[in-house]
Amino acid sequence: MPRRAWTCGGLVIHTDTRELAGTGLVRLANTRGLASIERLEQWATTPGTVVKPIIVVDLAEEIETAGYVPTARQRRQAALIHQKCSFPYCQARAERCDLDHRHPHADGGKTSSHNLTPLCRQHHRMKTHHGWRYHRLRAGIYRWRSPHGYEYLVSPIGTIDISGDLDPPLTLAA
C-alpha cells in the first residue's frame, strides 16, 4: 500500500551539526516534539509531498533596519522565538501579532530584534494606552507589570504570576 503524502501548513526545523551529519533528533518548532532524521526523510520522500525550503533565520542574530516597519526576516525571527503574543496568558500566534517597539521608535528606539516584541493588537493597545509596562529579561522572556501593580513572568512556555499578595484582602466593618 503506497504511503500518503504528508500535509503540513509549515514545518520549522532547528538543526545543529549533529543533525546535519545525519544523527540525532531534530526539534520541530510548530509540532509537538522531536523527530528522527530518518522520519523526516520518510516524510520528505513520500510521493506527493512538496518540500519548499525557507530562508534560514538565525534566532540569535541581531537584525536591524533603518525604518519603522519591521522586515519580513524580523517578523519571522520574532515569531520563531516567541511563538505567541508576549502578553500574560495570551495565546494569539506570534505570526499574527503586531511587533511592538519596546523602546518607542519616536523616542529613538531601533527597529531591531532586541527591541521588537510580538503583541496581539488588543494587548499592543493595552500596553501603549492603558499603563501596562514590561521589560525584556532575555530573548522571549519578559517581566510585565499591570497598572495595578501585579507582575507576571512571560516566556514561551507560559505565564507565571509573580505578584505575591500585594495588599491584604479588604474587609468591611459590620
Image: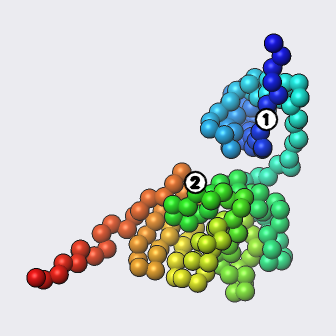
> Of 164 and 123, which appears nearest the observer?
123
Percent x, y of residue 106: 72, 86
> Of 87 and 111, which appears nearest the observer?
87
Percent x, y of residue 115: 68, 71
Q: Given the current orientation, which residue lies at the most extreme top position?
A: 1
Q: Amino acid at mark 2?
A: Pro
Q: Secondary structure at mark 2?
A: loop
Q: Residue at x 50, y 67 (%)?
A: 143
Indicate whether 80 appears above or below 17. below
Q: Given the current orientation, which residue lies at the most extreme bottom position?
A: 107
Q: Amino acid at mark 1?
A: Thr
Marks 2 and 1 sit apart, C-alpha to C-alpha, by 26 Å
Indicate whether 6 appears above or below 149. above
Q: Is residue 78 visible?
A: no
Say whether residue 9 is left or right of residue 91.
Answer: right
Give the label on residue 41, or none. Answer: none
Residue annotated with mark 2 = 156
Percent x, y of residue 61: 75, 58
Residue annotated with mark 1 = 7
For mark 2, does the 10 Å Cα neighbourhood hold few (<14), some (14 to 19), or many (20 or more) residues? some
Quadrant hosting residue 78: bottom right
